[in-house]
Image (cartoon, rainbow, N blue to C red):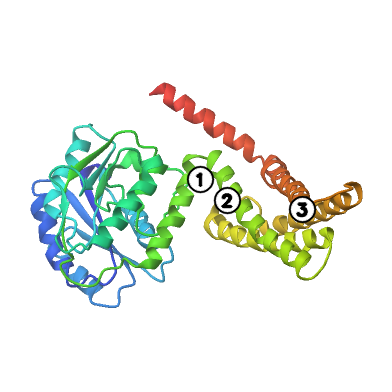
C-alpha cells in the first residue's frame, strides 16, 4: 500500500549508466532506516541505463519506468514518476550526482514536521553554493532565470532547483500541469498553489560522469515555460500584456510597409493602410502560432485557426473601411492619421472579437470567475 512507503525518490534519466551505480548506494545511505523507493524514469536511453537498473533492482528498492519517444522532456518524466510513486513524500533529484544525495534526509524533514508544503535544495542561501567549475556565464544565466521567475516564485532564492520534495496530497491538488523543459519545480510550485516553501542549503556539484543536457534550446523552452506560468498565475493581466506586445510588434511591421507603399510606390493612404495591415497580420500570425503550439491542451475550440482567419479578415475589412473613410472625410489628412485611425480601429475590432466575444461564447469568462471564487473560498477556509 502507498502508506507503507515513506519516501519516493523520482530520478529522470537519459544515458546515465555511469552515474546510477554511484547514486543508488548514496540514496540508500541517506534514507537508511526509512521505507523508500527509487523510481528511475528513463527517456529512451541508448546506453546501458536500462540494463544496469534491472541489475540494481535486485539489491535496491528500484523501479525502472521506460518511455519511448517522449515529447515532454524531463518535466513529463518527473510527472510520470509521481503518478506511479507510492510514497507519502515525493522527492525529485537528478542522476548525475550534482544534487547531493546525502541531503535527502534534510530535504524531507520539513515535510515530516509539517513545517512546509514544498522544500527546495538551494545553492543561494547560507551554507549552499556551487562547485568551482561553474562559469561566470552560467552564474549570470542562473541569476537572470531566477529574477524572471520572481513574480510567482516569491522570495525563493533558487526556483530553478531540480532537487525538491513535496507531499503526495500537495501534488494531487495541482491543476493544469503542463511542464516544458527542465524546470518542473517551478511548474509544481505554481500549479499546486503552495504557500509554505522551505529552502535547505545544498552544494551543487559538478557532474560526476556523462554529458550535460542543458543547451540553448532548453533555455528558450524555459522562457516559453515562464510564459505559460505567467498566464496561469495572472490570468487577466498576462494576456493583456501579451496582447499589447503583439500589437506593438505588428504595428511596427505595418508602419514600415505603410511608409514604403506611400513614399516609394506612390500609393495613397488607403492602399498603404491595407497593405500595411497585411504585414501586421503576418506578425500576429507568428504570435498565434506560438499560442497554438504551447496552449493546445487547454484550447476549447477544435479549429482555433478558423477563428483566427475569420477575425483577421474582419480586422482587415475594418482597417480598409476606416482608411477609406478617413481619406474621404478628412480634408487635410496627415500621414500619421492615415496610419493610426485604420490600425486603431482594426485593433479594437481584434480585441473585441478575440478577447471579449469569443471568450463569452466559449464560457471562458464564467469558468474564470468560478475558479476565482473557488480560490477565494479555499483561502477563507485556510
- Which residue matches tag 2? 245
How far apart, in angstroms, are the residues tagged by discs 1 and 3?
25 Å
Residue in view at x 48 percent, y 26 percent: 376
Residue in view at x 24 percent, y 51 percent: 163
In the rendered structure, the answer to whether residue 1 lies left or right of residue 233 reads left
- Which residue matches tag 3? 315
- Which residue matches tag 1? 231
**Closer to the camera, 78 or 97?**
97
Residue in view at x 40 percent, y 41 percent: 151
Estimate the x, y position of residue 42 in percent, counting from the top left.
Answer: 30, 66
Q: Nearer the viewer, mark 1 or mark 3?
A: 3
In the rendered structure, the answer to whether residue 160 lies left or right of residue 372 reads left
For marks 1 and 3, the one nearer the N-term is 1
Q: Residues within 10 Å of mark 1 (few under 14, many from 20)?
A: some
Q: Residues within 10 Å of mark 3 (few under 14, many from 20)?
A: many
- Cβ atoms under marks 2 and 3 closer than 8 Å: no
**Closer to the camera, 248 or 107?**
248
Residue 39: in sight, yes or no?
yes
Amino acid at each position: 500500500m502507498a502508506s507503507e512507503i515513506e519516501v519516493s525518490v523520482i530520478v529522470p534519466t537519459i544515458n546515465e549508466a555511469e552515474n546510477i551505480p554511484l547514486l543508488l548506494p548514496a540514496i540508500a545511505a541517506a534514507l537508511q532506516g526509512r521505507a523508500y523507493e527509487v523510481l528511475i524514469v528513463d527517456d529512451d536511453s541508448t546506453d546501458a541505463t536500462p540494463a544496469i537498473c534491472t541489475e540494481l533492482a535486485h539489491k535496491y528498492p528500484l523501479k525502472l519506468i521506460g518511455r519511448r519517444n517522449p515529447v515532454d522532456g524531463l518535466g513529463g518524466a518527473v510527472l510520470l514518476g509521481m503518478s506511479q510513486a507510492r510514497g507519502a513524500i515525493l522527492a525529485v533529484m537528478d542522476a548525475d550526482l550534482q544534487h547531493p544525495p546525502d541531503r535527502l534526509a534534510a530535504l524531507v524533514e520539513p515535510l515530516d514536521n509539517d513545517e512546509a508544503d514544498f522544500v527546495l535544495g538551494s545553492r543561494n542561501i547560507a551554507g549552499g553554493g556551487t562547485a568551482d567549475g561553474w562559469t561566470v556565464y552560467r552564474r549570470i544565466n542562473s541569476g537572470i532565470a531566477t529574477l524572471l521567475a520572481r513574480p510567482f516564485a516569491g522570495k525563493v532564492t533558487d526556483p530553478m532547483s531540480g532537487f525538491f520534495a513535496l507531499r503526495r496530497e500537495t501534488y494531487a491538488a495541482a491543476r493544469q500541469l503542463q511542464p516544458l523543459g527542465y524546470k518542473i519545480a517551478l511548474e509544481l510550485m505554481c500549479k499546486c498553489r503552495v504557500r509554505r516553501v522551505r529552502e535547505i542549503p545544498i552544494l551543487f556539484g559538478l557532474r560526476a560522469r556523462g554529458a550535460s543536457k542543458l543547451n540553448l534550446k532548453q533555455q528558450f523552452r524555459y522562457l516559453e515555460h515562464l510564459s505559460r506560468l505567467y498566464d496561469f498565475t495572472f490570468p487577466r493581466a498576462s494576456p493583456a500584456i501579451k496582447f499589447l506586445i503583439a500589437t506593438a510588434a505588428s504595428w511596427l511591421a505595418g508602419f514600415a510597409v505603410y511608409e514604403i507603399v506611400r513614399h516609394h510606390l506612390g500609393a495613397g493612404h488607403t492602399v498603404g493602410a491595407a497593405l500595411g495591415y497585411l504585414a501586421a497580420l503576418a506578425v500576429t500570425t507568428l504570435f498565434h502560432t506560438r499560442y497554438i503550439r504551447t496552449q493546445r491542451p487547454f484550447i476549447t475550440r477544435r479549429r482555433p485557426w478558423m477563428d483566427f482567419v475569420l477575425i483577421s479578415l474582419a480586422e482587415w475589412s475594418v482597417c480598409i473601411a476606416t482608411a477609406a473613410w478617413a481619406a474621404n472625410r478628412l480634408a487635410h489628412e496627415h500621414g500619421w492619421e492615415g496610419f493610426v485611425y485604420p490600425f486603431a480601429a482594426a485593433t479594437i475590432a481584434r480585441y473585441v472579437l478575440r478577447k471579449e466575444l469569443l471568450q463569452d461564447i466559449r464560457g471562458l469568462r464564467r469558468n474564470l470567475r468560478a475558479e476565482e471564487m473557488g480560490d477565494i473560498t479555499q483561502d477563507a477556509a485556510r
